[in-house]
Structure formats: structure tokens, C-alpha cells
Image: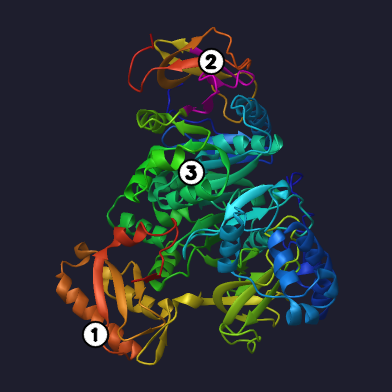
Amino acid sequence: MGQLAKFEIPESRDRMLDRSMEAMDRSDLLAYQEQRLPEALAYVESHSPFFAETWKAAGLRADEVSSLADFCERVPFVDKDTIRAYRGDRRDSLGGLRRMEHVATLSSSTGTTGDPLVLPSGYGYGPTDGGGLARDWWEIGVRPGDAVAFMLFTFRGAAWLTAHALGASCALFDHHPAEFARWSRASVELQPTLLYLLSGPLIMAMAYMEEAGLLSCDLTEVFASYRGVVIGGEPLGARARADLERWGGEPFLHTAVGDVGSATECREHDGLHLSEDSMFVEILDPQGTEPVREGDVGELVATTLVPRSANPLIRFRSEDLVRASTAPCRCGRTGMRLWPVGRKGDEVVVDGRSILPMDVWQIVEAVPESTAGYFQIVRTGRSMPQLKVRVGFDPGETGRAAVAVRADLTETIASVLGIAAPDIELVDNEVLLRQGPPHKIPRVVSS
Amino acid sequence: MRAGGQIPKIAFGDSIWGYGRYGADQLLPLSHDDIRHDTAGAVRALRGLALPDRSIILLVSKVADMGHLHPVQAAARELGHIVANADASIGDVERVAMFVRVLPIAAVIGVNVEMLGGMADSGLDPAGVLSGVPVIVALGAACDQLVEAGVDALRLELLGPVLAMECRSRRLHIDGVRWSIEEMGGTLRVSNLAPRALSVRSFDTGRHGRVTAEICPCARFDPVIELAAEGGGTPA
């Protein structure tokens, strides 16, 4: 077993796939990042017309940056809009991120907040490139010879190669309720150790089918072999979490990190770990350029340290709002941990109160007819005279009339958030499910 | 063995690449060896599309079908092409449209009926979105729909555990190095010629059709089959 693994496999009981990197002393880690940075910047300057032009316009040459302090002081920020603008102005389909002759694979951003961005990755697979996901899965409990079940979509590329890199195999299922029966049978037969990934909408569908007697299996038996269930797309609502835990599934939250990597919870469930040897992450004032105090909410700004193979993004403002900590985790890892809070463009201010989708989520879930937690804030601007929420609604849940459900939601949201009565629009759950990628709902939309 | 029959149990070990799907809901076990050989077959299938060097191929697929299509993706890379991925589902049609709009896509492979329906639901005209792409390869019924709409689409078929793809000469080939195919009792049956994780002998694909003896103008030596419309008889 394990001879096919691309990593040097440690002892099975070791919680870390690469202890030398994952538990590196923090000062050594910063020195390591500082050492990799000049080479990364030089590569990007010579291979990315977009960054070469952006830096030149800022009067910057890559070889002038020799420290993390220089980097933070001098390198300009970029975001999706600046890349989209370059794409339009220069008629460069890759947004100038990389020249086509150096592209190995094209992926794309999720497209939740607009036209997806084409992300060109390059050739080469260094010892730590893309290793973050493998480290996360090792910590959850994947070992050579195991099976990893993928209930996924294909737009992010061949994620199953990470299973093979660990010497494991993959079992492939669509991210769709129509696959539950085949997945259930395979789970019992193959005894996979990891499910990558489930999402809130899929868990709610599973719960609905269980309740309606549409599943021919006991979900506790199906989940029995899994050491972890990776949750992606958006945070897990309380109702979906309770259902998953009732079946014996242990959720591990997972998020993309500014399209240069990803972060996943460890078994301590105290923040999402990222692999800082392949990326440099800053948490900055969402409206400015200064770092926030550790633990405060800030915008995640990402820089890849492995641009040869990864998406070549430098000081990319992700618009993701997170809290972060660099304190060592109980699992022994020393890298930064994240707690996602929401998206920068998602915040609305009503009656002087800042509101994010997370604030509305649990209130919507607590009402029986909207217990699936499907909703979206309809935004007219950052500041709104009245909160407007579109809520997915299943009248079959209790038989109550829509007018009563609307009154219930209006009163509860107003009282819990301390705002004037919101405008509630009830729609069929399907209307919201069809708006996003398969694993999430756009939680904020323009009116 | 009938389509949809019991799959053989195999030991779970390091020779196993993974499990895809065949038929409506069967597990398709694949070894690393199977994937290597299927990739070699897919190299020949892609050559049959006569794409220019360094083409951009948009592969649209469901994850469960990647047991069949991962070799196509690997073959594309082996040939030096660039692959972009999108999910062949209703929720991902905007991504397909975006890729086709912003990139010089040379081929879209894997278009399915669900995706065409999703485009129509989103107000996108599938023929309008796809007609500018030089090569469209679509699964069975989606191919029929596109051809009816005036799109010059080639056919892709998943015949149980076997993938069949038309070449630019419009002949539907299977990988003749790894599989044999014969008509028996009106339907096409496949057998593996070399050991595979899923070993089948005379697997009934449930599809009516015939194996032709012609030499394909594309110069590919893999067998050529003709399929009748689903549920129909042997083609004339």
C-alpha cells in the first residue's frame, strides 16, 4: 500500500503529513516566505502581462522587493474587477494573468458574485504546491489504501488527484440528490474514510428524502466509515449541521483562500488551517490598506508563493471577510487559522446596524416552513432604509398560510436584529437553489 | 452479463484508481492500469478530432462520468492541449457560456441534455452559444438535439463501461486495443481484451447497432460502430 503516493508518507498515527512545514516555528515560517517571495515575484513579472503592467505603473520592479516589509509597503493590490477590466481593455481572455503558452489548465472562480474569472494554472508540481488539501485530508484521517468519496462538480478540476497523491483511491458521485442511492451503496461496500464534499443544500435534500422515506438505507450506517465530511460552498447552517451529526458525520469546514489555495478545519474544529508555505496571506481593513488587529474582522488578501503551478495572484483582494489567528492550534500546527465571516459586498446597514447573511441565517432556519435556510438579502445599496429578504419556503412543512409565515419571519428578524420590520418575499426553495453553483446560494443579490 | 447487472467485487488495494459510474447507477471500478490504457485510447480519439496544436478544450462532465472522461482529460494534456472544466449541470451553464465567450475554445466535449435544458432555462440559446465552436462533441440525445438545431455536433456515447466517440469523419469508434465489440441478438455486446478491474464478457450494452467493417477515412484502426436510435432496431 502507498507506493503510488506522491508524498513521503509519515507514520500512520502522525497527525501531520509534513511536520517540518506544518509545525514550523512561526519566525522560521516568515523567513521561509521571505525567501520564496523574490523568486515568485520575478516569475510573475516575467510571465504575467497584467502584473508586469500594474507594477510598472506603480513604479515598481520585482527585484526591488527583498522583504515581506517591502512587499506590504510597495506592491499594489488587485481584485477581480481590475483583472476583468484588463481582460476587456486588452481583449486578453486570461486577464493578463499568464500567457497562453505557459498555461497547463484553465479553471475559474465560482461565479457567485458575477462573471466567473478564468484562472490559468501552469506546469510543475513542487513538493508543497497543492499540498494543502492533502495535508488537510491526512489530518482528518485519510491513509494510503483508503477510498475517498467525491460528491462534487467538475468546474474546479480534478480534485480526485489529491486522493491519488496520498495513495488513496476515489469514488466519484455527482453533487446531486439523484446520486444518493449509488453513494449509499458504495459507502457501505467501499467504506470510504472521507467525503469531499457536502453542502448545506445537499444535506437538506438528504434530510428531506430521509423523512419522506425515499432513502432505502440507514444514514448512520452509510456514514459509519467516514472519519470526516468536508463542507464546502458556504458555512453550515445549524439545522444542516444537526442533521449531519445525527447521522454520525463529522463536518470539517472548508473554504477557498483567495483562489490561491484552500483552508480546512482540523480535528480540533478551531479555525480553518491554511498552508502558509505556499501562500502569503494578509488580513487588512476592508475599506483600507492597513492590517487589522489579530482577531478582528478583515479582508483576506492572498499572494501565491508558487506561481509557476498555481493561479498567479499577488496581493489579490478576495473580498472575503475573515477573522484570523497565528496562535498555534491544539493540533500542533503553527500556520494561520481563519474563521470566515462573509463577503465584503454582502454587508448592508439598516437602521445603523451592520447586517451580514450569517445574522439572518439562524432566524430563517428557526421557522419551520423555511427550515432549509434558503434565503437571500436583496440589496439596494450598502445602506438600506428597509431590509429586504427573499426566503425559500415549503408550505408543505406545516400547512400554515404564507401570510402567517411571512408575519412570523418579519417579526422575528425585526426583533432579533433590532431593526424596523423587514420586507419579506416568499419564494419556492427551487427558485433559490437554481440561482447558484450546485453547492451554494447567492446570499446577497442586487435588487 | 446484462446491462445493470451485478459488478464483480474486487479487493480494495493500491492498484485501484477509483470508481466511476456506468449505466444509470452502477459503480465502475478502474485500476491505475485501466486509466493508463484508456488514456492511450483517448489519445487516438482526440487525434480523430483533428484539433490544432495547443487547442483549448472545454470538457463538460458530471463528476461520476469522469471514470470515462478523466482519460480524455489526461489525453488532452498528453497531446499538449489546454483543458478547461465545467460541470454538465443546470447550475453551471453560465460558466460554459463564459468560457465560450472569452476563450478561443477549439472543442467542447461532453455536452449533455441537462446542460442544454439549463441553457434554455437561463435564456441562453444553446445553438447560439455553441455554434461558434469548431468542434462540439455531445452525448447521445444532446447530440441529436444539437444537430436538429443546426449545430454540427459529433457523437459521444457511454456504452456501459466503454466510451465511444465520433471522429471528424463522423464514424463512431471504440478503443479496439482494450475492447472487442460484436452484435448479438440485435444488440451490441462488449468484452475486455485485457484484464481490467471490471472484467466483462459479452456485456450487453442494451443498444441496437452494428459493427462495420469499413476502414475509417480518419485512419484510426479502432472499430467503427453504427448505433440505432435508442429503443430502435439495427440500423439499415
Q: Is residue A187 in view from this perspective?
A: no
Q: Which residues are the magenta region?
A: B154-182
Q: Position of residue A236 (x, y in %)?
A: 45, 69
Viewer-proximal residue, A227 or A51?
A: A51
State the predominant SS element of the stretch in magenta.
strand
The label nearer to you, 1 versus 2, is 2
Q: Is residue A400 above or below residue B73?
A: below
The kind of residue on which mark 2 rests is Val
Which residue is labeled 2 in the image?
B224
Q: CA distance from mark 2 to mark 3?
A: 26 Å
Same chain, labels 1 and 2: no
Q: CA distance from mark 1 to mark 3?
A: 43 Å
The residue that appears at 68% across and 53% down in the rendered structure is A121
Same chain, labels 1 and 3: no
Q: Is residue B165 magenta?
A: yes
Viewer-proximal residue, A231 or A9?
A: A231
Left or right of A33 in this view: A168: left
The kind of residue on which mark 3 rests is Lys
Viewer-proximal residue, B125 or A86?
A: A86
**Badge number at residue B62:** 3
Q: Position of residue A39 (x, y in %)?
A: 83, 65
Q: Is residue A262 magenta?
A: no
Q: Is residue A72 in view from this perspective?
A: yes
The kind of residue on which mark 1 rests is Glu
**Badge number at residue A91:** none
Which residue is labeled 1 in the image?
A411
Left or right of B159 in this view: A108: right
Quadrant position of the C terminus of chain A in the picture: bottom left
The residue that appears at 50% across and 48% down in the rendered structure is B101
Q: Position of residue A322 (x, y in %)?
A: 56, 78
Q: Position of residue A60 (x, y in %)?
A: 78, 74
